Amino acid sequence: MNHIKRHIEEVIQEKVIDFPLHSGKIKTQSGKIFFLKSGHESAIYQCEANGLQELAKAQSIRISKVISVGENYILTQFIEPSRPASGFFERLGRHLAKLHRYTYENYGFYENNFIGLNPQFNVPSKSEKDNWIEFYLNKRLLVQFHLAEKNGFVSQQLRKDFNSLENKIEDLLQNSLEPPSLLHGDLWSGNFLCDSTNNPVLIDPAVYYGHREADLAMTKLFGGFPYSFYKSYQEEFPLKSGWEYREGIYKLYHVLNHLNLFGKSYLPETEYLIKQYL
């Protein structure tokens, strides 16, 4: 960790007097505070930095500024979290809708990154660039399903059911297609903050350009966000009809990822999400 500390001092041109063991607040001699994440050598830190910088391009929602990044750490602006006050979730909904209006010419991203600690494959094939259904099936659902097979979680019945969903997915999604939106990619309640001015701040992204319903579906896991969030989002950027029905298809990617990361406790929900479309 000493070499990280020395490198950070060179970058910020100031002595660090309070340095965490792995992750946490860094305090400088003059009293400035930054936030450090470290612990192991991985491309995950550079991918996080690139994702934060991509989100910042939309200028729609506050993003923690990247100060420095290396192969075993990322240093960002420190944002003192506050308890959300009245109007916070309405603001989060509106700002997310504005983020989703920031679009690109094709689906995916210029690099692969991570969803949790699992790899997330974003670089599209030629045919996937302008085909959301093909991109989502190949780069999201099939990747996680094959990993679940490798991990020993897939029964003969689950494989049969997944194959049935695979055959139906074009019919299920074809009437909802839109231009590629900039997505946070891992938008659950642990990946945003409320700052001191009651404004939302996005952290820990798994960025790519995709269908915005995928971001919103992720918010419904682990209890979901307050109703006011969804109401203000819809007022700002209404979703196409049928989005509630399609929600489970997008939840499935994250539930499969949790199955692969954390084990069989996520198997019943995986089976349920697939069966509701059969």
Image: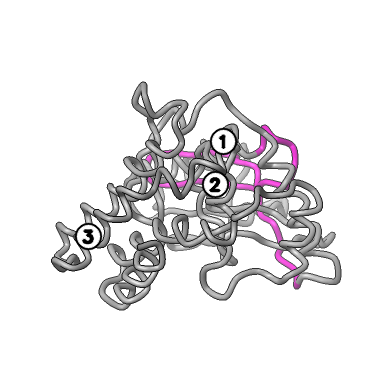
Does 223 sit above or below residue 230? below
Disc 2 or 3, which lies upstream in sequence? 2
Q: Position of residue 74 (x, y in %)?
A: 49, 46
Residue 175 occupies which quadrant of the picture?
A: top right
Residue bearing the label numbered 3: 148
Give the side of residue 24 with respect to residue 128, left or right: right
Residue type at mark 2 is: Leu
Marks 2/1 in contact by CB < 8 Å: the verdict is yes
Q: Position of residue 250 (x, y in %)?
A: 47, 55
> Element at badge 1?
helix
Instruction: State which region is magenta.
Output: 56-83
Q: Is residue 257 above or below residue 140?
A: below
Q: Is residue 77 magenta?
A: yes
The residue beneath circle 1 is 11
Residue 75 is inside the magenta segment: yes
How crowded pointer 2 is (Cα within 10 Å; few <14, some 14-19, many 20+) is rated as many
| Residue corresponding to mark 2 | 75
Judged left or right of residue 168, residue 199 is right
The image's colouring method is: one colour
